[in-house]
Amino acid sequence: MTEKDRIAANVRKPVADIERTIAIGTQTMVVGPYAQRLRLRPGQEARPNARDTAARLVEAVGLAAAINLTVRAERLILLDRPTPATYLGSGKVEELKQQIEELEIGLVIMDAALSPVQQRNLEQAWQCKVIDRTGLILEIFGRRARTREGRLQVELAHLGYQKSRLVRSWTHLERQRGGFGFLGGPGETQIESDRRIILDRMVRLQRELDGVKRTRGLHREGRRRTPYPIIALVGYTNAGKSTLFNRLTSAEVMAEDLLFATLDPTARVVRLPHGAPIILSDTVGFISDLPTTLVAAFRATLEDVIEADIVLHIRDVSHEDTEAQAQDVTAIMRDLGIDPDQPDKVIEVWNKIDQLSTDAREQAMNRAENATTLLKPIAVSALTGEGTDLLLALIESKLSADRGLYQLILTPQDGAILAWIYREGEVLERRDEDNGEINLHVRLPLEKEGLLLRRVPEAKKLSSNNPKTTIEPSSWQP
């Protein structure tokens, strides 16, 4: 095939296929330069890094695999502190340079947040492309965004990231002359011109996102009027949120063993054990060191989490770094204004128990069962469905905490009332008598009590209800 034919063939390919082809052909090295001790604030005593460095490097390689990069080498480097000029010490820079040349590496991924100067200096030293963790995550999000809203959010975050790195692209350009003849002053530099273009584009994107935000607000307002409770799934990326979402909703959301498989939020209606409808919302996964530009850009999407009646914190308990991942997720939840320790708002779900060994599984189940904290976790397997019935029952009990419990008798002519009860509440128990009468125990939102009593004045309120309320056959009242 000639070069002309190859170019023509690439033109006919979808953009995603072209990007995948380029990524597979790019020889990549992943470098994990991790500090052994952390200082959260200036002057504060350093403490050991709680995250497992080997697990962090595996995660970084997984991020590279998420966009089909060919990883030829992985390097774990432990640092006392980053070097201002190149992040790594000069000896490590030289050592990696030799390996990069031997393996013909075209891209180095530094699993850290690099400054523009550090990024430029490393590229000059290694003579290849260098991107940091933020740039890699932005690249993944750019590939995965499917909806207009997702693309707007990714582009806004990417422009905010790129704005501070213009110097890397334009250092070879001199100042342009402004004005006329010899009296003109030094005009706008190319850097300033491009920065102005980026800022103008960011303003337009933010205006469009504000429109999206208003639209989502109207959708949320419509859902409140329904009113169906909203249950949001949050958790570390690849914790199994989409698999659990598919299990509970019978949907077909993309669910793969891949970091950031889900980017665009999805919502479906689910029926609880006694028939009450809820809206289940799948969201983008969180990750450690999530770029602040992405958190800000995706706030419109994450508002669904903020507005949720219950948040399911999905944890991958089979992961060796599950505790550190949970801490990262709870930190982001606090940034969003959600108290992760609020028992009536958050349910901690321990997922992937099917991937544990027999002993580890038994220990996890015992820890979940005997937990003394308010946030007693529930162990499930989204893949096999184990524990999901208990999870739905727990969601139902938490939502019913502010619902009234009623006993009533309907006649065969009360079909419309019966349909309304099934639509607006939960039928906990039903007994059809020989004479055609229907004895019901039902649970309704307190705001529906007035409507119920107007339609069935003889209805008896049994209790204000609580999460542990159950109905036994012996509780029927004459």
Image (cartoon, rainbow, N blue to C red):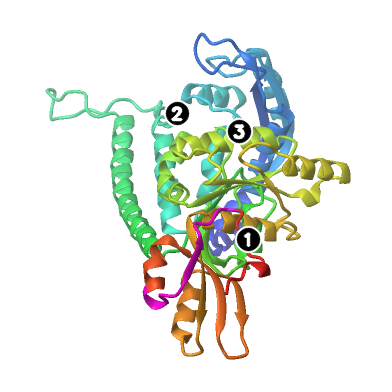
Q: CA distance from mark 3 to mark 2?
A: 35 Å
Density class for disc 1 (Cα within 10 Å; few <14, some 14-19, many ≥20) is few
Q: Nearer the viewer, residue 188 or 176?
A: 188
What residue is rendered at 40% in x and 49% in y? 300
For the question of whether residue 107 can be seen, the reply is no
Q: Residue furthest right?
A: 358
Per the rendering, the mark at residue 262 is none
Q: Eyeballing the image, is 97 above or below 329?
A: above
Q: Amino acid at mark 2?
A: Arg
The mark that comes first in sequence, 3 or 1, is: 3
Q: CA distance from mark 3 to mark 1?
A: 35 Å
For the question of whether residue 358 can be seen, the reply is yes
Per the rendering, the mark at residue 168 is 2
In the rendered image, which quarter is residue 1 located in? bottom right
In the rendered image, which quarter is residue 101 located in? top right
Q: Amino acid at mark 1?
A: Thr
Q: Residue beneath label 1, please?
A: 470
The mark that comes first in sequence, 3 or 2, is: 2
Q: Secondary structure at mark 2?
A: helix
Q: Residue beneath label 3, please?
A: 327
What residue is rendered at 46% in x and 72% in y? 459
Q: Eyeballing the image, is 448 above or below 91?
A: below
